[in-house]
Image (cartoon, rainbow, N blue to C red):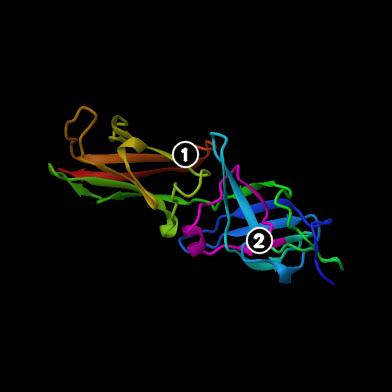
Amino acid sequence: PGQVRDRAAPVITRAVYTYGEGQDRTDTLNVTFSEAISIGDIASEPFSFVSHRKDGSTINYSYTLQFSRELNTANSYQFIFTPAALNSYVEPLTGDSIFISPGGGITDRATSANVQTNPLNKRVQLEIVVAPVNLKLIVGPNPIVWGEDTVLIIRIEGDNNQTFDTTRTDEFVPMADVAIYDYLGNIVHTATEQDMIVTPKSIELNWNLRNRNGRFVGGGTYLVIARVINRVDGQIILSDRRKFAVIK
C-alpha cells in the first residue's frame, strides 16, 4: 500500500535533549510520539528545531541524526548526534522547540502508512538535560618563592580535563570568586570572575603576591578559598580550599 499523507499521522509529544560528557561527547535526543513509528522510513534530518530569541524572533535549524534504538517507554525512540555535527550547527538551548520536518519521513505503522508532512504539525518545548560539571581547584607552585615577578596560579578546571564551555549552553554560566587569607584569618586578596582568565576548560587567576593595598605579602602560610556558582540556578558547583606557603 502507498503512503497516506497527514491523515492521523504521528506528532511529537515529548523531546529530551541530553548533553554527553567529555570532549568526545555523544549527545542524544529521546523523542516520544503520539503513536509508534516506522523505523525504516526515517530521513537523515527528521526534525526541525526552533530557537526562540528574546526579541520575539525565531530561527529554524536542523541536524543530521542517527537513529539509535527504540526505548522502553511507549512510542519513544533515541537518536544520537556526533560532535562533528554539533560543531557545525547552533546547539539546542532551553526554550527551543521541536517538530517533525515535513520531509522527515516520520510514518506510523498503520497499514495505510500515514506520513507526517504538515509543516504546521505540533511543536513541543525541548527539554534540556546538561551533563554534570565536576570542578577541581589547583594552586601552584606550592611552596612559592617570593620575587617581584613571581605569580601564583590559582586554577579551577574540569575534572579529567572535562570541558565546561560556557558558550555552548545557557544551562551552566559560572560565577567564580576567590579569597586569600593569611594564617591569622585576615583577607589579603579577593578576586571575582572579572579578574580571571576564563576558557572552555578553566577559570584562572594569576596572583602577584600583593595584598589589597598593593604591597607584597610576607612569608608564611596562606589559604585560598574558591567558589563557583551556576548563575542560572544558584547552585554551588565548587566550594574548596587549599593551603600554600610563601618563602621569602
Callout 2 secondary element: loop
Callout 1 secondary element: strand
- Residue 19 rendering spot, x and y as whole percentages: 56, 55
In the displayed structure, 89 sits above or below 233; it is below
- Residue 210 rendering spot, x and y as whole percentages: 20, 35
> Disc 1 residue type?
Ile
**Which of the two discs, 2 and 1, sits closer to the camera?**
2
The question of residue 114 being in magenta is answered with no
Name the residue carrying label 2: 46
Residue displayed at 51% across by 52% down = 90
> Disc 2 residue type?
Pro
Apparent side of residue 219 relative to residue 223 in the rendered image (left or right): left
- Residue 63 rendering spot, x and y as whole percentages: 57, 59
In the displayed structure, 79 sits above or below 206; it is below
**Which quadrant would residue 65 be assigned to in this image?**
bottom right
The question of residue 84 being in magenta is answered with yes
First to last magenta residue range:
77-104
Q: Which mark is residue 229?
A: 1
